[in-house]
Image (tube, helix red, strand yellow):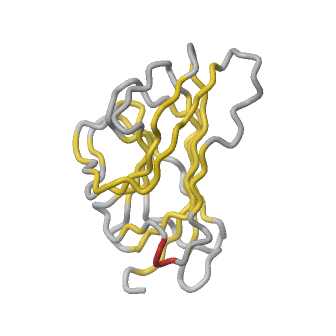
């Protein structure tokens, strides 16, 4: 992936502990001041420590990035070593943001189940994958400024069972004028 001025990157947040606060971004792809950022794929899976949990997971577009809280930043890795350094940032929150993160609307939503880590069930598998790779570029979720973001959240729900999540995102970057 890297046609037509687009450079493609991925970042992962393994073993993300999102805390137990309601209504906040779990993971967020923040836009760029110098590039157009298009989401190609975002995925999440996880386990809970004490009880099976079913949450309402949604992918939202934000008019402002989340502020405050405590975030860990995923290492953005170019899919091709010849690519320039990425300008977008993928981060996951371990303590709820305290501001920003103004939701424009939900792009996708589904039920998300985390199984108890100590059960004899098989691993949770691929989890939830939202894949926009087959859409034309003009239809992919797109960020045009550093103020915008795309975020995963539990739609106001509170994760109550010490979830441990694995989250990753793939995105492309290209000049703003393209």
Q: Quadrant of the N terminus?
A: bottom right
Q: Quadrant of residue 62?
A: bottom left
Residue in the image at 49% along x and 18% along y: 161
Q: Position of residue 170 (x, y in %)?
A: 57, 60
**Is 94 on the left or on the right of 116, as rendered?**
left
Q: Is residue 47 above or below residue 68?
A: above
**Residue 12 shows in the view:** no
Q: Quadrant of the C terminus?
A: bottom left
Corner quadrant of residue 26: top left
7 w.r.t. 55: above or below: below
- Residue drawn 56% across and 73% down? 135
**Residue 141 in picture, x, y percent from top left:** 44, 66
Q: Quadrant of residue 177?
A: bottom left
Task: Examine the rendering and report whether any part of residue 24 can be seen.
Answer: yes
Left or right for 142, reference 5: left
Q: Nearer the viewer, residue 162 or 13?
A: 162
Residue 139 coordinates in the image, percent (x, y)? 47, 74
């Amino acid at each position: 992936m890297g046609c037509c001025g687009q450079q493609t990157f991925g970042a992962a947040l393994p073993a993300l502990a999102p805390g137990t606060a309601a209504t906040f971004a779990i993971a967020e792809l923040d836009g760029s001041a110098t590039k157009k950022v298009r989401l190609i794929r975002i995925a999440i899976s996880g386990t809970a420590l004490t009880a099976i949990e079913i949450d309402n997971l949604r992918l939202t577009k934000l008019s402002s990035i989340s502020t405050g809280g405590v975030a860990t930043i995923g290492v953005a890795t170019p899919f091709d070593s010849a690519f320039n350094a990425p300008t977008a940032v993928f981060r996951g929150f371990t303590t709820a943001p305290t501001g920003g993160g103004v939701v424009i609307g939900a792009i996708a939503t589904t039920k998300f189940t985390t199984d108890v880590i100590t059960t004899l069930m098989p691993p949770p598998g691929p989890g939830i994958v939202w894949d926009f790779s087959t859409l034309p570029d003009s239809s992919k979720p797109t960020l045009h400024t550093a103020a915008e973001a795309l975020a995963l959240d539990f739609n106001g729900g509170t994760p109550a069972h010490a979830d441990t999540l694995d989250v990753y995102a793939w995105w492309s970057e290209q000049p703003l004028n393209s």
